[in-house]
């Protein structure tokens, strides 16, 4: 069971401002049934530019309902300019915190608010699913790169797990995880350098035999051995004869029924990727 | 506030008679059953009785029972043993609706050890296709592992037929019967499964004890290596109190089997009918005919499962949800998704699982209490049947 604060429980069990505003000045709709949570936010703005009323309808879990309820309470009485400054962190703080895995509920609130204000200003048609520009990253939950980058920067996210907690991206089939890693690197200023035209076709290209042997040793030491040791096994390099690498399994790997699979799927794959795709590995 | 416990597929109340049976072995009769002295020996005798009781419930011989710590250990032992016994075979068959004890292991074996795994799909009611299963069998198939009954929907799979087919192809057959044991009649003298897993806490014994049936003369490789307990097939000092409790629970399960299939089933059906008839946009998930007598999985359209669970928790009703938000994952139940249940309904699924300790009054209370809770949650929701395009429910039969 999730550990919710008393305030989350209160807003979930006694949600404030539930419903629709027929004469709303701005409507923001985010999420979908497929995603498992959705929020429609309605705002009414008075002559002084203050939000005089806000209502919501939410499909989702306790955090989603509580975040929506909290958001409406935070909005009423604020000017639109003040409301624009509300972030998902503010919503979570208002509730005394949310479980990290549920932070996407607060992000949904912030996104709905942005959409409602845009809609009020005539920047997006009323009652329409917000349209995204950019690249669709997570097909399972329909999350675009701009949302992910925004969440990373806004919340100083460091890991893919963080990104999933805050945006849901990566929480389905997992195919987009490499893209999430790329966006994290981009957001933290670690963009990939342009590929030089003189880049070798494979890491060992152009190396002397000694350099190549050292690279093979290094891949076995750093990439292969720790994985085998984690399962109580080990490996030793026996010989290198042109493209043929001969190894010996030790410990739990020795005589293991899966050793041939380990040889091909772990050892050979690592050496081919990090040294030379022509390499073959056998036990000796 | 009294708790109305309808989550018996998660765990069960320890039967008071089971608790009484195990109590002396904590404080007075605490000897090690492997000891040579009489003080330990008398505990060994009780273990023997417990083994006979488990065997009696399954229709096998006591020598074919290995005590384990849980269903997951039994499942892991069965699959790893089969793979070790026939290392040249690199293919496994299971289903997309198994418990994580099987699914996560299979995914691990695929990723780490290069095994190929076929995950059999289901139809919209969660039923397996025998022809798909036959087509999946290969000369290099090492083991088939298919659950006897599904933990979420209660669907009972045609294990006898599937085990026979595996035997014809000389393939080991394991079944995770954790949910089935004690609820359906299992006779291993007739059903040719090679290995079967069960768990104590699903049939009114405590948590932390399980068993694995391994058919006589089946090649077997232990998972836990150490001492000579369990005839060297599972090392480690026995959980004597747990095993004695399991033995008593199996004895009671035999006595109550008829009740499971009449009284428990009657209450389940009453609950199901009451909810489906009084709440619009609800669907039953699973096979209405071939199902555990205690399980009902109902989807409440346009509301989310965790919200329902927390609302009913407020009035003392404990159940489970296949919704994503309760599990920590973001996608709803893999079982419901494998069945093609549309998102409209998958996110709002609730599993009610009864036991012989539930009463008519409790069921009446749930039938009366749930409709206004669902109605209130729907008032909060931006979705409803009217607002949804028909395509959302098109693939969902009945």
Image (spheres, coloured by chain):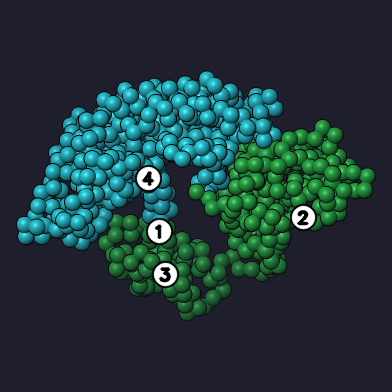
Chain colours: A green, B cyan
Report the residue marked by disc 4: B102
- Chain bearing tag 3 is A
Give the class, few, some or many, for how many residues have Cα within 10 Å of label 4's Cα (few <14, many ≥20): many
Q: Nearer the viewer, mark 3 or mark 4?
A: 4
Q: Earlier in the sequence, mark 1 or mark 3?
A: 3
Q: Which residue is mark 2?
A: A86
Q: CA distance from mark 1 to mark 3?
A: 17 Å
Report helix, strand or loop for mark 1: helix
**Residue at the front extreme of this rendering:** B1
Residue occupied by mark 3: A226
Q: Secondary structure at mark 4?
A: helix
Helix, strand or loop status at disc 3: helix
Q: Nearer the viewer, mark 1 or mark 3?
A: 3
Question: What's the residue at 53%, 30% (across, down)?
Answer: B370
Residue A264 numbered mark, or none: 1
Relative image position of residue B337 (x, y in whole percent)? 51, 36
Q: Earlier in the sequence, mark 2 or mark 1?
A: 2
Q: CA distance from mark 2 to mark 1?
A: 53 Å
């Amino acid at each position: 069971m999730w550990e919710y604060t008393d305030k989350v429980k209160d807003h979930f069990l006694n949600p404030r401002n539930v419903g629709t505003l027929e004469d709303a000045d701005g409507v923001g709709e985010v999420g979908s049934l497929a995603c498992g949570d959705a929020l429609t936010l309605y705002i009414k703005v008075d002559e002084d530019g203050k939000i005089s009323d806000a209502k919501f309808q939410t499909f989702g879990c306790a955090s989603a309902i509580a975040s929506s309820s909290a958001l409406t309470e935070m909005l009423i009485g604020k000017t639109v300019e003040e409301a624009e400054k509300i972030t998902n962190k503010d919503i979570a703080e208002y509730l005394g915190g949310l479980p990290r895995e549920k932070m996407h509920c607060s992000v949904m609130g912030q996104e709905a608010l942005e959409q409602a204000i845009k809609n009020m200003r005539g920047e997006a048609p009323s009652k329409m699913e917000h349209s995204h520009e950019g690249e669709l990253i997570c097909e399972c939950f329909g999350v675009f790169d701009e949302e992910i980058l925004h969440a990373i920067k806004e919340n100083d996210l460091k890991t893919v797990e963080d990104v999933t907690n805050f945006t849901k991206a990566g929480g389905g089939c997992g195919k987009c995880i490499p893209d999430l890693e790329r966006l994290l690197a981009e957001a933290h200023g670690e963009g990939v350098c342009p590929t030089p035209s003189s880049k070798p076709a494979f890491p060992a290209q152009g190396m002397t035999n000694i350099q190549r042997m050292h690279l093979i040793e290094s891949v076995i030491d750093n990439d292969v051995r720790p994985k085998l040791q984690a399962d109580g096994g080990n490996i030793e390099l026996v010989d290198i004869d042109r493209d043929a690498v001969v190894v010996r399994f030790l410990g739990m790997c020795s005589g293991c029924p899966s050793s041939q699979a380990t040889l091909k799927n772990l050892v050979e794959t690592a050496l081919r990727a990090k040294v030379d795709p022509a390499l073959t590995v056998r036990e000796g | 506030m009294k708790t109305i416990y309808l989550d018996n597929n998660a765990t069960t109340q320890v039967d008071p008679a089971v608790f009484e049976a195990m109590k002396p072995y904590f404080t007075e009769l605490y000897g090690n059953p492997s000891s040579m002295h009489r003080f330990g020996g008398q505990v060994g005798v009780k273990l023997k009785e417990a083994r006979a009781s488990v065997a009696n419930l399954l229709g096998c011989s006591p020598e074919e029972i290995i005590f384990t710590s849980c269903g997951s250990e039994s499942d892991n032992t069965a699959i790893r043993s089969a793979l070790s016994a026939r290392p040249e075979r690199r293919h496994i068959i299971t289903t997309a609706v198994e418990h994580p004890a099987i699914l996560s292991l299979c995914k691990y074996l695929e990723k780490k050890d290069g095994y190929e795994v076929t995950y059999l799909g289901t139809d919209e009611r969660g039923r397996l296709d025998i022809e798909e299963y036959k087509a999946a069998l290969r000369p290099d198939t090492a083991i088939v592992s298919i659950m006897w009954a599904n933990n979420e929907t209660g669907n009972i799979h045609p294990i006898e037929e599937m085990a026979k087919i595996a035997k014809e192809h000389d393939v080991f057959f394991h079944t995770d019967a954790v949910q089935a044991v004690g609820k359906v009649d299992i006779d291993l003298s007739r059903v040719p499964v090679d290995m079967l897993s069960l768990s104590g806490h699903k049939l009114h014994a405590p948590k932390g004890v399980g068993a694995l049936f391994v058919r006589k003369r089946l090649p077997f490789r232990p998972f836990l290596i150490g001492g000579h307990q369990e005839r060297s097939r599972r090392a480690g000092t026995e959980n004597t109190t747990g095993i004695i409790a399991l033995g008593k629970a199996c004895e009671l399960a035999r006595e109550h089997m008829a009740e499971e299939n009449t009284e428990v089933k009657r209450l389940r059906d009453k609950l199901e009918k009451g909810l489906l008839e009084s709440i619009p946009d609800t669907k039953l998930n699973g096979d209405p005919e071939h199902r555990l007598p205690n399980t009902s999985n109902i989807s409440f359209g346009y509301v989310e499962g965790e919200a329902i669970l927390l609302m009913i928790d407020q009035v003392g009703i404990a159940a489970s949800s296949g919704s994503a938000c309760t599990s920590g994952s973001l996608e709803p139940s893999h079982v419901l998704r494998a069945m093609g249940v549309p998102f409209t309904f998958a996110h709002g699924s609730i599993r009610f699982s009864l036991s012989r300790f539930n009463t008519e009054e409790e069921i009446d209370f749930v039938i009366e209490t749930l409709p206004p809770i669902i109605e209130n949650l729907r008032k909060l929701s931006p979705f409803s049947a009217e607002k949804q395009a028909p395509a959302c429910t098109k693939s969902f039969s009945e």
